[in-house]
Amino acid sequence: MGKTIRSGADRSKLMAEQIRLLDSGSLITAETLEGAIAEIAGDIVDVETPLGDSVANGVLTLVDKTPVNAVAAAGKITSSGALVAGSHATSKLTSDTVNNSEDEIVTIGTTVYRWRTTLAQAYDVQIGGSAAASLDNLMAAINASGTPGTEYFAGTLEHPDVVAFTNTDTTQIITARVPGTVPNTIVTTTDGAHLSWPAATLGDGTGDSNPGITTAASHVVINGRTYSFVVELSETSGADAIVDQILYGGAEANALDNFELAINHGATEGTEYSTGTVINPDVTAGTNTDTTEIVTAKVAGVIGHDITITTDCANTAWDAGVLGTEVTGVDGTVGFAREIASDAAYVYVCTAANTIADGNWERTALTSY
């Protein structure tokens, strides 16, 4: 029965015994070697050796097993047609170039902006030297930018629901801070004789009033983290960035490219995906085509099969509800550094300590000589 050599000290003692036997002129056989092992380490029990080798019937043999390296689970998302990205409601206030009059108002949502030559209260907007200058001051008031106390009353706060974006001498565009249909009902009215909105609500759909598209069907979810495809990033129009937004880019191929960038935190944050989006801790996005994207678990092994993947995007589907269909996760064979094993075709060496999530086994084919 083979004995386990448990430590370097055991090996050193065995080598010393071998030298003693040689010096004495004794014949070293498998039997005397077995006896030396038993004498040196009498407390070593008869177990299958963890060193990957054993002595049986006088012959040194390797453990007969086929170690495997860990394989990371992967899944694939496929686009078969147009997805519907979320968008922001917008509208346009238009001036006929005649300046505003004292105490005329512009209402956006529940916020009432009042035109004044002398500012007296929050949300008063300074009447400028021209209609264009007055629109500039309104833009500053909506965004709480510029110079408080000069362009608008100093106690004015930024509008909670919209931002004032593109501005010309005769027009002011406002955009919802968040995508979706909810902002479509934000009130947009005025009693100004020389100002007009295309509709009484932000996203009415009349003229230059463009409805926001719902984001309820624009999501891809990986292990509970939700990514949202949008026509434009919220920060593009000056609103606060919304983490994990992905720019649609006008086509599904572009959307998948940007999806990959967002997962891996590639170039460029704030352009292809929103500012504040961080690298995904669970998966890496890899192989990409115009219609598919493969994501792979960062930790190899069957544990990757626990990573959930879902989507509510139109014409878009994962190959399963969890990773492991595109590539099945495999647990690696546990081993320690320099462990050796063999099977009928290969000799295997563990180059470093191996866990079920590692890939430190290497092999060489057995050949005749």
Image: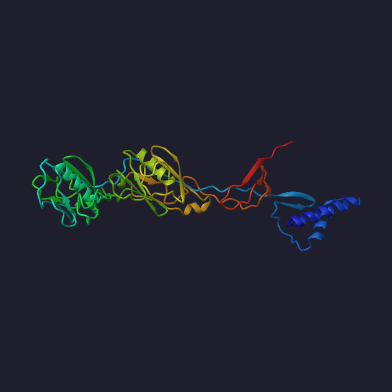
User: Is residue 181 in sight in this rendering?
Assistant: no
The outermost residue toward the top is: 369
Residue 354 in sight: yes
Q: Residue 56: where, in percent of width, then height?
A: 77, 53
Tell me what residue is drawn at x 14 percent, y 43 percent.
Answer: 129
Residue at the (11%, 46%) spot, across then down:
100
Coordinates of residue 107 in the picture (x, y in percent): 15, 52
User: Quarter holding the C terminus?
Assistant: top right
Front residue (pair 169, 133): 133
Answer left or right for 270 relative to 120. Answer: right
Q: Nearer the viewer, residue 234 or 140?
A: 140
Instruction: Give the image location of residue 352, x and y in percent.
Output: 64, 49
Q: Residue at x 23, y 52 (%)?
A: 148
Quadrant containing the N terminus is bottom right
Residue furthest toward the left? 193
In the displayed structure image, the side of residue 75 where residue 71 appears, left or right: right
Left or right of residue 88, residue 59 in this image: right
Way the structure is coloured: rainbow
Q: Position of residue 74 (x, y in %)?
A: 47, 46
- Is the residue 95 above or below the residue 19 in the image? above
Q: Is residue 176 left or right of residue 294?
A: left
- Total numbered labels: 0
**As drawn, which residue projects farthest toward the right?**
25
